[in-house]
Amino acid sequence: MQSEDRKLVRLWCAGDPDAFTALILKHEKLMRRIAVVTAGSLATQDEMLVDDIIQEACMRLLDALRRYRGTCEPATYIAGVVRICALDAVRKQVRYENETMHIADELSFQKLYQSDIADDIITKLENKKIFELLAKIPEPERSLLYLQEAEQIGLKELSKMFAMPLGTVKSKLSRAKKKFRSLIGKETLT
């Protein structure tokens, strides 16, 4: 049986613009969470960065979904495109800051979004701490940990998404979990 997402991709490829809109709206919260986690601390410094990442991801998905081969679920494919866009945005932002020596002001998490999008992971104090701790873990370990634990994406899907052997994904996840536990331990001591 074909999933609803796969049907929407098929309809989009057949020329139905409403199918693309429906697919994006269905996965908008996932896309925002991936963008926030991948962008790390930069997402708190620039309130428009996450919106820019989502917009760029949508532009890329317009073409990329036509090349979707069905080797993973469409949600995983979409998450992968968003992650790549977020990494590109982070690289661009870091380059820009290095060139101009501009330091962005810190923004509160409540100001990061003016709507209720993904507020279940941003507005609660506990989740703010988790986000801050996640930001201390380097890429791609941070994204692997978040995608597996929070988004429940399986190891095989992560292996495909990150174009890494399954063993590499497992070892990077193990290191990320160990680092995260260490960071949590340090937080409880302070």
Image (cartoon, rainbow, N blue to C red):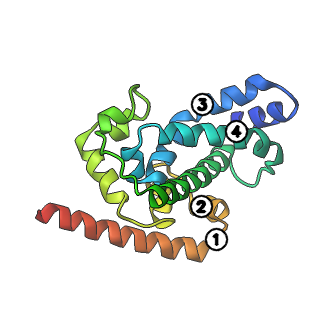
User: As shown in the figure, which amino acid type bears the numbered disc 3?
Assistant: Lys
Q: CA distance from mark 1 to mark 3?
A: 28 Å
Closer to the camera in the image, 190 or 153: 190
Label 4, secondary structure: give it.
helix
Which label belongs to residue 158?
2
Q: Residues within 10 Å of mark 3 (few under 14, many from 20)?
A: few
User: As shown in the figure, which amino acid type bears the numbered disc 4?
Assistant: Met
- Residue at the limit of the structure toward the top, as seen here: 18
**Relative vertical location of residue 5 with respect to residue 154 in this rendering, above or below:** above
Task: Tell me which residue sits at (48%, 65%) in the image.
Answer: 139
Q: Residues within 10 Å of mark 2 (few under 14, many from 20)?
A: many
Closer to the camera in the image, 23 or 112: 112
Label 1, secondary structure: give it.
loop
Closer to the camera in the image, 31 or 70: 31
Which label belongs to residue 89?
none
Q: CA distance from mark 4 to mark 3?
A: 16 Å
Q: Quadrant of the N terminus?
A: top right
Q: Name the residue carrying label 1.
A: 164
In the rendered structure, which disc, 4 or 3, sits on the residue that comes first in sequence?
3
User: As shown in the figure, which amino acid type bears the numbered disc 1?
Assistant: Met
Which label belongs to residue 59?
4
Q: CA distance from mark 2 to mark 3?
A: 21 Å
In the rendered structure, which disc, 2 or 3, sits on the residue that comes first in sequence?
3
Position in image of residue 184 (x %, y %)? 24, 63
